[in-house]
Image (cartoon, helix red, strand yellow):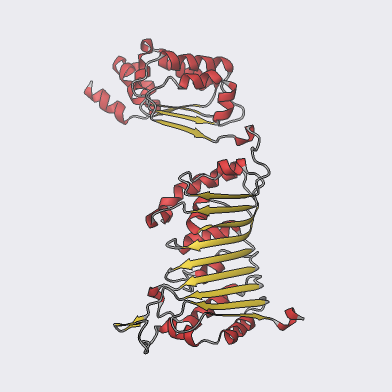
Amino acid sequence: MDTLARIASFASREAISTLMQANHFLYHEGPKILLRDVVVLQNHADVLLFLQFMRAEKGTRSRYLAGLAIAPPEKKEEDPMQEETAQMLTQFLITSSFDRLMTLRFEDPEAKITRYPDLLAACKTLSGIECFTLESCDWSLYPPPFPKVRKLTISWSDYRSLSPYIHAFPNLRHLELNDTFDEDDERRPEALAPYRQVNQADQCRQGSWSLDELSADVADVYVSGLACRVGHLFLGMHNETFEMLENVISDICPSRLSLFVFDRVGVFDKALGMPGVLVRSGGKELIALRLEVRISPDDRDLDIPRALEHLCASICELPLKSLILAFDCYGLPQWRGGLKMSTSSTSKPPPCCVGRYLQEVNLEMLGLRILETVATLQEVTLSIKGHHIREDDEVVITRPEVLQ
C-alpha cells in the first residue's frame, strides 16, 4: 500500500484517474491527491463530470476539495454552463461538507451571478473560504455613474487599481495622484510590478482615458499602468529608477513633460539618466520639456557643461519647441574641506564644482548656445535658485524669427 501511495503522489492527474479504475486502494486515495489542487470548471461537460466524480463514495470526496474555479469555456464551440447544471452545482455546494475548501475563484463573475443568482447564494454558505477571487469583472454591465466629472484627485489610497475610477469617470480630463507610497522601499520596481500588470490587463480589456493633464510621482504613474494619451504630464521623481521613468514616458507619449527631480543622483548620465531616457522612450510627440533638478549632494562635482551636451544631443531628434531647465541648489553642501558656512561669517568657503559653475555661468549665453545646438527649439528658459552666493536668476531666450 505504501508503494502505491508513493507512486500516486508522483503520478500525473491522468495517470491517477486511470489507476483509480484498476485498484481499489487508489480508487479511495486518488481523490485526495486530485482534489488538493484547484478544480477548474469551464463548460457544461466539466460540471457534469465533476459532480459525477464528487458523488461517488457516498459524496465523501467533498471533504478533500481544496479549491474551485468557475471560468468561461476556452473554445467558442464548447457549451457554457447551462441553467440545469448551474442548479445542480448550486445544490452540491449547499448540501455537501467541505473540510478543506478555502479557495474560490470566479472568472467573468457578473455574467454568471446575473444569470445564476442562486449560485452566489450557495457560495455564501461556504464559511471556510479564505481566498475569494473575482477576475475579469465586466464594468460594461453598469452605466457610468459620473459622466460629467472632468477632474479627479486620488490621495492616500491603498487601492492601487484605476479600473473602478476609469469606469466611474469615463470623461475625465485632469487626474492627480497623491502620496500613494509612504516608504521608499515601496517604490522598487519589483514591489510595484504585480500592481502594474493588473492595471495594464484591466485597461486592455476595459479601455482607459484621454487626459489633458496628469500630475503624480513617477511611482504612481508606473503602478497605474496608464498607457492613454496625455497632453501635459507633470512628474515628481524621488527614489524611483530611471527605468521606471522610461517606461512611463514610453507608455504615455506626452506632448508636454514637466519633470521635477529631487536629490536624484545621475540625472544627466548619458546612458542611464535623462539623456538616455529621452532617446530610448521615443518622445516623438514631445514639443515642450521642463526639467527642474534639485541637485543631489552626491552630484556636487558634476561637470554641468558636459551634462548639458548629453541632454542637448538627446533632444536633437525630438520635435521639441520649448525647453525649461531649472537648477535647484538647496541640496548642495555649503561647506568644503571641513569649513562650514556661517550666516555671520564675512568670508565664504569655496563652492563645490557644481556650485562654482552655477555661480559664474552666463545664463543668456548658455541659452543661446542651446538654441544653436537644437534646431527645433523656439524658446529656452534657464533658471537658478537656492544658490548660497548667487541670487535667484532666470532668463528666457527666444529665436528672433519667432518674435517677428
Towards the viewer: 187 or 316: 187
255 to 52, vertically: above or below: below
Q: Residue furthest front?
A: 344
Which residue lies at the image location 39% right of the left edge and 83% below the top edge?
352
Which residue lies at the image location 61% right of the left edge and 82% below the top edge?
373
Towards the viewer: 21 or 47: 47
Which residue lies at the image location 46% right of the left edge and 80% below the top edge?
387
Q: State left or right for residue 382 relative to residue 24.
A: right
320 to 166, vertically: above or below: below
Res. 362 image quadrant: bottom right
Q: Residue furthest right?
A: 404
Q: State left or right for residue 159 relative to residue 286.
A: left
| Image spot of residue 12 (x, y percent) | 37, 30
Q: Is residue 278 visible?
A: yes
Which residue lies at the image location 64% right of the left edge and 83% below the top edge?
372
Res. 323 image quadrant: bottom right
Q: Which residue lies furthest to the bottom in this view?
A: 347
| Image spot of residue 166 (x, y percent) | 60, 44
Which quadrant, please, contains the N terminus?
top left
Q: Is residue 73 visible?
A: no
Q: State left or right for residue 33 relative to residue 267.
A: left
351 to 17, vertically: above or below: below
| Image spot of residue 177 (x, y percent) | 53, 53
Which quadrant, please, contains the C terminus?
bottom right
